Amino acid sequence: MRASLLSLVAAAAAASAQSTDAPVVQGNPVGAQYLATLPIKAGSSLGGSVQAESAPDGKGVLFSISLSGLPTEGGPFLYHIHEKPVPTDGNCTGTGAHLDPYKRGETPPCDATKPESCQTGDLSGKHGTIPGQSFTAKYTDLYVATSMSDPSYFGNLSVVVHLANKTRISCANFSMNSVGAVSSSMPVPVGPSSGHAMPTGTGGYNSTMTMTMTSTATGTGSGHSSAGESTGSPIMPTAPAETSAPANSAGKAAAGAGAVIAAAAAALML
Ligand SMILES: *[C@@H]1O[C@H](CO)[C@@H](O)[C@H](O)[C@H]1NC(C)=O
Ligand SMILES: *[C@@H]1O[C@H](CO)[C@@H](O)[C@H](O)[C@H]1NC(C)=O
Ligand SMILES: *[C@@H]1O[C@H](CO)[C@@H](O)[C@H](O)[C@H]1NC(C)=O
Ligand SMILES: *[C@@H]1O[C@H](CO)[C@@H](O)[C@H](O)[C@H]1NC(C)=O
Ligand SMILES: *[C@@H]1O[C@H](CO)[C@@H](O)[C@H](O)[C@H]1NC(C)=O
Ligand SMILES: [Cu+2]
């Protein structure tokens, strides 16, 4: 009895210490496309977008990233897919931790030579950090999904940009441009606020799935209309005493927010 209890405990400990590698995601719906557009916030020139679409063969997801106006200090910058959407008030802390369905955790840091061992949401860990004030990149990530039934599905989640010290400087929901097609038929376009995303029925769609996709698309679309107007959300942490300000005139506005940012900084890690 005692021995078997001990071995159970030992087995449980071994299981929790052992993280599971992420599988390559196959069968992403062809043509599925998502877009996250960073809101331009007062006091920050940071903007840009992360576009994601199924790889043509359904194996992984092709990312096209274009960012500009990153701070002159605090890099190299990090960016990740996080496990929750951005709250309506735009507070990036509400996005929680990284997308990590295989429970790998934060440590040790992602080894880019073994991307399957990284958190699936750790895009900069797997594909490189952002070295400068503007950034473009295109790459395929094999471990995230546009298929809603996959644990690494990110279409209803968010992307977060961080300073090197993990402070969150911007975030945005992904929204759906197209749900894609599970078979090889044409992708289905989905308007951001349209309630009429039903496929015509000739593409081999599963009607149960279609209902889910339609409601997701509608919710995301309406949520985005107020994204740029939020207040009290984390902005570029330019301290008043710092000599280098952002290149645009909006830098002045950031200075007053320095104290608020400093107070919130501890809560903004990850
Ligand atoms: C992170 O870095 C920025 C810029 O270097 C700095 O202003 C901020 O205080 C740092 N935050 C933490 C939590 O270390
Ligand atoms: C992000 O999406 C969620 C869920 O659809 C929504 O409630 C929220 O308002 C959105 N956030 C923003 C900043 O638009
Ligand atoms: C996102 O969608 C997936 C698939 O429908 C669902 O399992 C998951 O709970 C959703 N996540 C959030 C944060 O809404
Ligand atoms: C549709 O999907 C649901 C849930 O995944 C499944 O239970 C059902 O059998 C599917 N129906 C068809 C016709 O494929
Ligand atoms: C953002 O949300 C976190 C909790 O998710 C909260 O502790 C923090 O005060 C919020 N920050 C602002 C600026 O509202
Ligand atoms: Cu992050």
Image (cartoon, grey):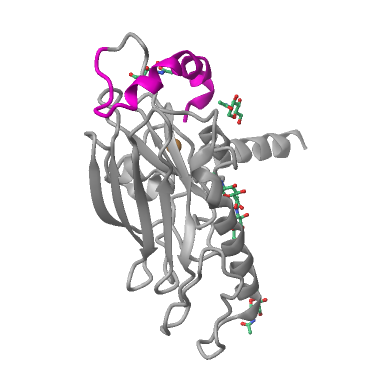
Count numbered badges in the picture: 0
Up-down: is 181 above or below 115?
A: below
Q: Residue at x 42, y 82 (%)?
A: 186
Residue segment shown in magenta: 243-270
Residue 37 place in picture, x, y as percent: 41, 49
| Magenta-colored stretch includes residue 257 | yes
Residue 69 place in picture, x, y as percent: 28, 35
142 relative to 192 in the view: left or right = left
In this view of the protein, which residue sits in the foreground, 149 or 78? 78
Give the quadrant of the N terminus: top right
Up-down: is 154 above or below 59?
A: above
Q: Residue at x 52, y 15 (%)?
A: 263
In this view of the protein, which residue sits in the foreground, 53 or 46? 46
Q: Is residue 48 visible?
A: yes
| Magenta-colored stretch includes residue 249 | yes
Taking the image in four quarters, ligand 4 sits in the one at: bottom right
